[in-house]
Image (spheres, rainbow, N blue to C red):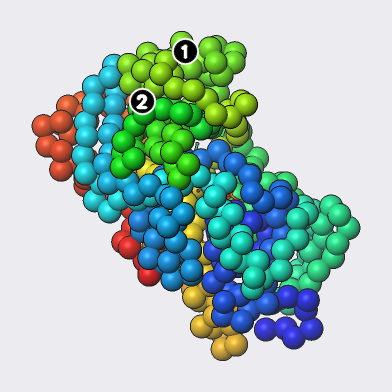
């Protein structure tokens, strides 16, 4: 590694992937700067169900969501637009915690061993083995490595001319917290025409309702309230939810242009982690675990090989391990999403799963990894 740079690693983006990498690397004496554009803490559009795949690893980093009130989730319910329902035990289970709190826990811990800057990165240059980073606040830093942890869609994807950003994506995400009575240990996935909505409890006892839909389904109704009343509420479970809950946010949070296209894992020597590397369909409830797990993969490779091997070796090893760990889940997630959004096909699969609930368990396992420590 270069000894004359300001930092060993600059991490761009302080979401779950960036914060986890900051924690892991800095706990191993790597000099890290995290640049995040928004102040902590803040809410994010997310289903807030985290797979237990990463719980032991988070515990090893000193993060204990369950002692901060996260709900342990063991049961899964899926319903069709017409209200037919299947319930099953989750093979691995997970926990429910708001991004507001989970990101804050990681930030508080990581800021003890890494430096943080609240600013937006606007330019990255790489020459003579050194990265030069510039922010909108006119700050300039150098580093030997850069981790791209800037999420689903960023100004930097445009700057880097990444392929996926050139194509429009029809997906829209909406999320808010509600006061509503539901079991602590359940995550529910309710289908509606043109999308699906997840419900699960968080550490505050609020129920997080988060849905993904196509812009085409949404635009017929014009606004969120009408869409929820006229479209989501055709599913009797969602009808019950919207009629018997009280929203705790002033208004729902939204994001548009959510892209599920393949992304390059290394661009101009910037190594991508989390959603910057690839986003799994949210119905799998696995994006956060993948973000955290990808940060772990890079951190382990980097710590082991930074002084022994070339940049090229580190980039190739990360790419191979990422693909081995996540490619199959992404493919299965994409297939399930296509099936769910075709009502006739979804009904056939639903009938089969009702007769043999092990089908559902099998599908869930195919979209999740093994527990990582
Ligand atoms: C509708 C929906 C529901 C979901 N539900 C679930 C679920 O229930 N369970 C699950 O596990 N996953 C879910 N996911 C996926 C999950 O939200 C993501 O996989 C996860 O947030 C990825 O974390 P990240 O750190 O990669 O990105 P993020 O958390 O998005 O962090 C990226 C950060 O980069 C910052 N940034 C961007 N550009 C710059 C810049 N130029 N300079 C500085 N900072 C920058 C942003 O401000 C942001 O804080 C869902 C996703 C969607 C869309």
Mark 1 vs 2, N-terminal side: 2
- Determine contact: label 1, label 2, CB under 8 Å: no
The residue nearer to you, when weighing 24 against 359, is 24
Q: Residue at x 61, y 62 (%)?
A: 108
| Element carrying mark 2 | strand
Residue 325, image x, y percentages: 39, 62
The residue nearer to you, when weighing 363 against 139, is 139
Q: Residue at x 53, y 12 (%)?
A: 226
- Which picture quadrant has residue 52? bottom left
Q: Is residue 2 left or right of residue 307?
A: right
Q: Residue furthest right?
A: 138
Specify the quadrant that holds the C terminus: bottom left
Q: Is residue 351 left or right of residue 77?
A: left
Numbered disc in front, either 1 or 2: 1
Residue 318, image x, y percentages: 50, 69
Residue 145, image x, y percentages: 67, 72
Q: Is residue 210 left or right of residue 130?
A: left
The residue nearer to you, when weighing 333 against 138, is 138
- Which picture quadrant has residue 265? bottom right
The residue nearer to you, when weighing 88 against 268, is 88
Q: Residues within 10 Å of mark 1 (few under 14, many from 20)?
A: some
Can residue 311 be seen? Answer: yes
In the rendered image, which residue does mark 1 sit on?
229
Q: Which mark is residue 191?
A: 2
Q: CA distance from mark 1 to mark 2?
A: 14 Å
Q: Residue furthest bottom?
A: 308
């Amino acid at each position: 590694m270069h000894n004359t740079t300001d930092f060993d690693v600059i991490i761009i983006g302080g979401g779950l992937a960036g914060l986890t990498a900051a924690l892991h690397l800095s706990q191993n004496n790597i000099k890290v700067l995290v640049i995040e554009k928004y102040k902590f803490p803040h809410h994010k559009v997310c289903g807030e169900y985290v797979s237990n795949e990463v719980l032991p690893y988070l515990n090893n980093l000193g993060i204990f969501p369950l002692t901060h009130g996260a709900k342990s989730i063991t049961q899964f319910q899926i319903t069709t637009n017409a209200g037919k329902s299947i319930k099953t035990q989750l093979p691995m289970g997970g926990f429910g915690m708001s991004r507001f709190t989970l990101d804050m826990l990681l930030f508080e811990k990581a800021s003890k061993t890494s430096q943080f800057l609240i600013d937006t990165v606007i330019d990255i240059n790489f020459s003579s083995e050194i990265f030069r980073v510039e922010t909108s606040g006119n700050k300039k830093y150098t580093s030997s490595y850069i981790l791209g942890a800037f999420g689903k869609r960023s100004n930097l994807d445009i700057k880097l001319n990444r392929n996926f950003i050139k194509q429009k994506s029809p997906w829209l995400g909406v999320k808010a917290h509600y006061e509503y009575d539901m079991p602590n240990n359940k995550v529910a996935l309710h289908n509606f025409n043109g999308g699906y909505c997840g419900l699960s409890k968080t550490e505050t006892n609020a129920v997080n309702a988060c849905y993904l839909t196509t812009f085409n389904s949404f635009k017929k109704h014009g606004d969120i309230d009408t869409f929820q009343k006229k479209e989501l509420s055709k599913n009797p479970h969602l009808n019950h939810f919207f009629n018997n809950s009280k929203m705790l946010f002033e208004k729902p949070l939204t994001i548009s242009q959510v892209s599920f296209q393949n992304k390059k894992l290394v661009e101009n020597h910037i190594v991508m982690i989390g959603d910057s590397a690839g986003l799994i369909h949210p119905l799998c409830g696995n994006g956060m675990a993948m973000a955290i797990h990808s940060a772990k993969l890079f951190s382990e490779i980097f710590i082991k090989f930074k002084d022994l091997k070339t940049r090229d070796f580190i980039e190739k090893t990360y790419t191979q391990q990422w693909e081995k760990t996540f490619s199959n889940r992404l493919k299965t997630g994409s297939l399930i999403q296509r099936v769910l959004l075709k009502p006739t096909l979804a009904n056939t699969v639903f009938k089969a799963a009702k007769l043999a609930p092990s089908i559902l368990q099998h599908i869930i396992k195919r979209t999740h990894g093994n527990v990582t420590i």
